[in-house]
Image (cartoon, rainbow, N blue to C red):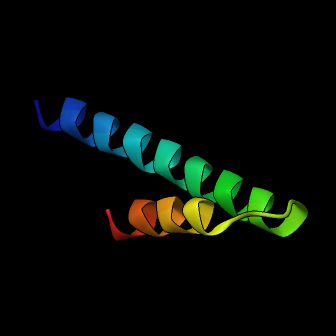
Amino acid sequence: MDEMLYIKRSIYRELFNNLCADFSHCRTRCDVDDEFLNIEKQAWDF
């Protein structure tokens, strides 16, 4: 059971890191508005 929990946490962590990287990439490459920045902040706060 602990092994499955570790695997799930690792997968979720990797997906979250990818999401944050996508936000960062979009923010640096595109003209983003305040709503985008607010959504990104909410993701980091989560």
* Residue at left offset 89%, top offset 62%: 29
Classify residue 30 as left or right of residue 41: right
In this view, the residue in front, 17 or 1, is 17
* Residue at left offset 56%, top offset 61%: 35
Residue 42 vertical position relative to residue 12 in the rendered view, above or below: below
Farthest left residue? 1
Q: Position of residue 34 (x, y in %)?
A: 61, 69
In this view, the residue in front, 11 or 3, is 11
Classify residue 4 as left or right of residue 21: left
Q: How many marks?
A: 0
In this view, the residue in front, 38 or 21, is 38
* Residue at left offset 50%, top offset 42%: 15
Residue 28 vertical position relative to residue 1 in the rendered view, above or below: below
In this view, the residue in front, 5 or 14, is 14
Farthest right residue? 29
Classify residue 25 as left or right of residue 1: right
Quarter the N terminus occupies:
top left
Residue 17 vertical position relative to residue 33 in the rendered view, above or below: above
* Residue at left offset 47%, top offset 70%: 41
Quarter the C terminus occupies:
bottom left
Q: Position of residue 9 (x, y in %)?
A: 31, 44
Q: Position of residue 8 (x, y in %)?
A: 30, 35
Classify residue 28 as left or right of residue 10: right
